[in-house]
Image (spheres, rainbow, N blue to C red):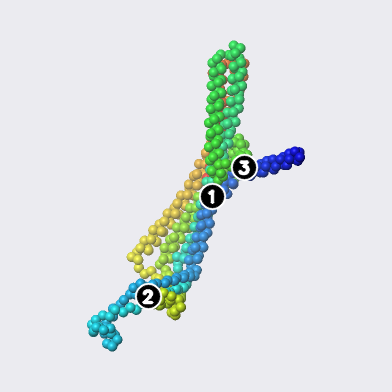
Amino acid sequence: MQSGYAKILGLFVAICFWSGTNVLSAQTPDTLSLTLEQAMEYASAHAYQKISSEYDVASAKKKIWETIASGLPQIDFSAKYNHSIDVPVSLLPAEIIPEDMRPPGIETGDKIPVSFGTAYDGSYSFSVSQMIFDGSYFVGLQATQVFLDLTRHQTTKTEIEIRDAVAKAYFLVLSARENLQAFEENLTVNKSLLKETEALFENGFRESMDVSQLRLMVRESEKQIVEVKRNEEVALAVLRFSLGVEEEQPIKLTNDLLSLSERATNGEAKKSGWSPEEHIDYKVASTNVESEKLQFKNIKSQYLPQLNAFYTYQKTGYGDEWNIFGDEWYKSQFVGLSVSVPVFSSGMRNAQAQQQKLAWEKSKNIRTQTMQQIKMQGLTALTDYNSAIDQYEIALDSKALAYDIYEKTRTKFTNGMIGSFELTQQQGQYIQAQISHVQAALAVLNSRIAYLKATGKL
């Protein structure tokens, strides 16, 4: 009996454990593993700014239909029901009423109060209008398409900015991790040296100053690790925001700083040519020129007449009782054309047209300026990129030399040939070379991204 109870209890515990494991696994988000390219692609689809820009494009498409619909038939319905608490009274000359029909006491020259209305009245109507000709309408159709193009260009520009921000945040995380790895290795070495020096001091082969110096080196290494971990946390927070993911989302970066730096220094990004006309800033400037041109055409179109057709069907009912819906209702219909012809505006429209023409000419000048600016930025970015590559190679050699010097100094210290002061100096030199190497790697990666952005390849 107890054996059967134990089996049931064991089965129950297993089911609870399995269910709890599934719940925990369901609540824990999967780790997002990303290379640099995958991170930029992910942000291009999920970043908050990109989602907002997609709403702008959707709104621009609706704007096109709004403009098209304004030239299609418009149908309206209206209705009203009135109760006149006091029916309006009009005064009529007594002369228009025969003497035998006049109220008592009314004589020639007097006024007779007469009510022409009823206490209750109601009406409803249907109206249809159709634009036949309006020059602004056809210009507006063209303008909405240009507006959509401009919105799409702005979306592309937003995406480029997103990719740029993601890449820089990605590099910051990798640089922090590269420094962290170097500082942790340095801490391990310092702790080992401290342990050996303490043993030698106890046996009288080292001075107490050497022990204190190594303890200080250990504390400095621990301080560097704490600082770089905080930098990594901040960089990860910036990266998550740029990606458009929640702060609880685990992220795994599958690239490392050195491999990306080596790829950035091989000059692959500079091999293919680029066309300034394909740069997004030039496309935006060109679209602005087209927009200003259409606004100029729109003002000129206001010199043309506007022609509209309309039809109205209406029924009206009257009564002295509140329920007028059972009484007879009287029908009326209207159909016709309306024409509006601008004749004279004291030069106002001409002044508006001249202002817009100047705005159009200004936009063309800005487009030319943008072209020259793009070329200048491309040349500057290429120069900075080449300089960053040179600085990276120098920093790489300097790190190797500093490490070699530090290793030899550490060997001499271990063998008792030098004191802790020389060791501290060489270790500080190596740490600075390590930091400079990471900074140079970060600079070359950022300059590569800047060059791709300046040449429209990002």
Inter-mark Cα distance, 2 to 1: 62 Å
Question: Is residue 395 at least partly visible in the picture?
Answer: no
Q: Are marks 3 and 1 in contact (CB under 8 Å)?
A: no
Find residue 107 and report its horizontal and vertical position in percent: 23, 84
Q: Earlier in the sequence, mark 2 or mark 1?
A: 1
Residue carrying label 2: 119
In this rendering, position of residue 311 left or right of residue 273: left
Q: Earlier in the sequence, mark 2 or mark 3?
A: 3
Q: Nearer the viewer, residue 246 or 55?
A: 246
Find residue 320 and report its horizontal and vertical position in percent: 39, 77
Inter-mark Cα distance, 2 to 3: 73 Å
Quadrant in the rendering for residue 19: top right
- Secondary structure under badge 1? helix
Name the amino acid type tagged 3: Thr
Find residue 110 and report its horizontal and vertical position in percent: 24, 81
Q: Nearer the viewer, residue 78 or 306?
A: 78
Name the amino acid type tagged 1: Lys
Crowd around label 3: few <14 · some 14–19 · many ≥20 (10 Å)? few
Q: Are marks 2 and 1 in contact (CB under 8 Å)?
A: no
Q: Earlier in the sequence, mark 3 or mark 1?
A: 3
Q: Which mark is residue 36?
A: none
Residue carrying label 3: 28
Residue carrying label 1: 50
Identify the residue at image location x=73%, y=39%.
6
